[in-house]
Image: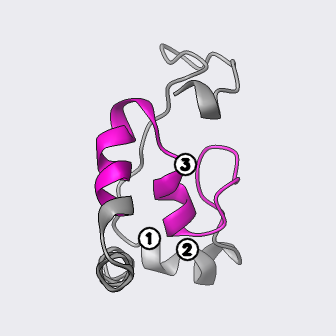
Amino acid sequence: GVGLADWLTAGDAGGTEWRTPPLWGIGLTETVNGHTFFLHDGRARNLTEAILWHGGEGQAARDGFAALSAGDRAALIKFVESL
């Protein structure tokens, strides 16, 4: 969405659109890349921040994640990291 916009066009994608890569192997990000920066510009320092930065089409998922208890959020992140 607009909150993450870089206003650069890449192929058919405008400055407010990004391809979400598959989540398989996301738990290995730090091991492979030496960091856990996420989103197109690395502004999210971890998966929780990456989820909470979403808006637009991802707003409902972000709101659902934010509504979870701290324990349920941690369990969800642990699951995603296991993929």
Secondary structure type for disc 1: helix
Q: Which residues are magenta?
A: 37-65
Residue 62 rendering spot, x and y as whole percentages:
38, 51
Q: Which mark is residue 42?
A: none
Q: Which residue is mark 2?
A: 29
Is there a contact, CB below 8 Å, between mark 2 and mark 1? yes
Secondary structure type for disc 2: helix
Real-space Cα separation, disc 2 to disc 3, in angstroms: 19 Å
Left or right: 80 in relation to 34? left
Kindly identify the residue that appears in the image at 49 percent across and 32 percent down. 18
Residue 2 rendering spot, x and y as whole percentages:
58, 24
Real-space Cα separation, disc 2 to disc 1, in angstroms: 5 Å
Left or right: 21 in relation to 29? left
Residue 11 rendering spot, x and y as whole percentages:
54, 16
**Amino acid type, callout 1:** Ile
Q: Is residue 25 magenta?
A: no
**Amino acid type, callout 2:** Thr
Q: Which residue is mark 3?
A: 53
Left or right: 75 in relation to 17? left
**Amino acid type, callout 3:** Trp
Q: Is residue 54 magenta?
A: yes
